[in-house]
Image: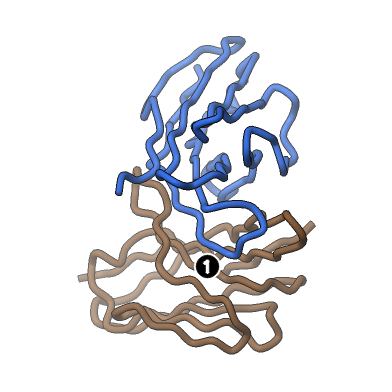
Chain colours: A brown, B blue
Amino acid sequence: GQQLNQSPQSMFIQEGEDVSMNCTSSSIFNTWLWYKQDPGEGPVLLIALYKAGELTSNGRLTAQFGITRKDSFLNISASIPSDVGIYFCAGQLLSGANSKLTFGKGITLSVRP
Amino acid sequence: KAGVTQTPRYLIKTRGQQVTLSCSPISGHRSVSWYQQTPGQGLQFLFEYFSETQRNKGNFPGRFSGRQFSNSRSEMNVSTLELGDSALYLCASSLGQGVAGELFFGEGSRLTVL
């Protein structure tokens, strides 16, 4: 089945640094989503991408939908302590009435003050 | 606009028991999906319901089941609980099937099986 690869499993950065996360797939998707999950909470949608090549920003977050439709990246600029959490990518391929999302295993981000 | 509501938030069961979890989607959302989250395994898809019908199913044993009501609220049930069923169970709602769109998650129900 479809799988999304996110690596590394954990990232450690210094407050103020930028960080970039990649998500790759062996299959194409026509929607890419990025979620963040805080401890004890459900994932919260950060950015949604609907078109190959699309570059979208949300505050300090920027995400891009890869041209090949098999990858996406998320960039966080000028990190702050509250950026700590698990970041998931998710891909969706619409096929008729099927719109199931496939999630990566997530990257746990730690930010040192 | 109220978000996705899951109940209960926390529960403890023993092996062999069964459990029912409830999910109320965002008003107007007709699709409800359920995920199991365990450390190291990420979000594992359980099933998706739309208009009271199961439309997609993940690779979980038959002990995991669900249903959706006419008001789009959904329940999932796990019978004959095993230790490995301990996890955070997340419900997510979206506008509908066949629509490119985002899933909105609840805070989850954390199940501990002793």
SS for dot 1 = strand
Please state which of residues B68 and A90 is positioned toward the viewer in this rendering: B68
- At horizontal 40% and vertical 61% (from top left) the residue drawn is A36
Q: Does B23 sit above or below residue A41?
A: above
Q: Is residue B35 visible?
A: no
Please state which of residues B70 and B26 is positioned toward the viewer in this rendering: B70
- At horizontal 49% and vertical 71% (from top left) the residue drawn is A48
Q: Residue furthest right?
A: A1
Q: Does B62 sit above or below residue B90?
A: above
Residue behind mark 1 = A33
Task: Give the total number of marks visible in the rendering.
Answer: 1
Locate residue B32, reporting x and y percent: 55, 42
| Left or right: A15, with A20 as reference point | left
- At horizontal 65% and vertical 14% (from top left) the residue drawn is B80
Locate residue B92, reporting x and y percent: 50, 45
Q: Is residue A15 visible?
A: yes
Query: Residue B56 falls in which quadrant of the image?
Result: top right
| Left or right: B6, with A54 as reference point | left
Locate residue A58, reporting x and y percent: 34, 78
| Left or right: B93, with A85 as reference point | right
Q: Does A53 sit above or below residue A4?
A: below
Q: Chain of mark 1?
A: A
Please state which of residues A40 and A14 is positioned toward the viewer in this rendering: A40
Amino acid at dot 1: Leu
- At horizontal 54% and vertical 44% (from top left) the residue drawn is B30
Residues packed near mark 1 inside 10 Å, few (<14), some (14 to 19) or many (20 plus): many
Q: Residue furthest left?
A: A113
Locate residue A111, reporting x and y percent: 29, 69
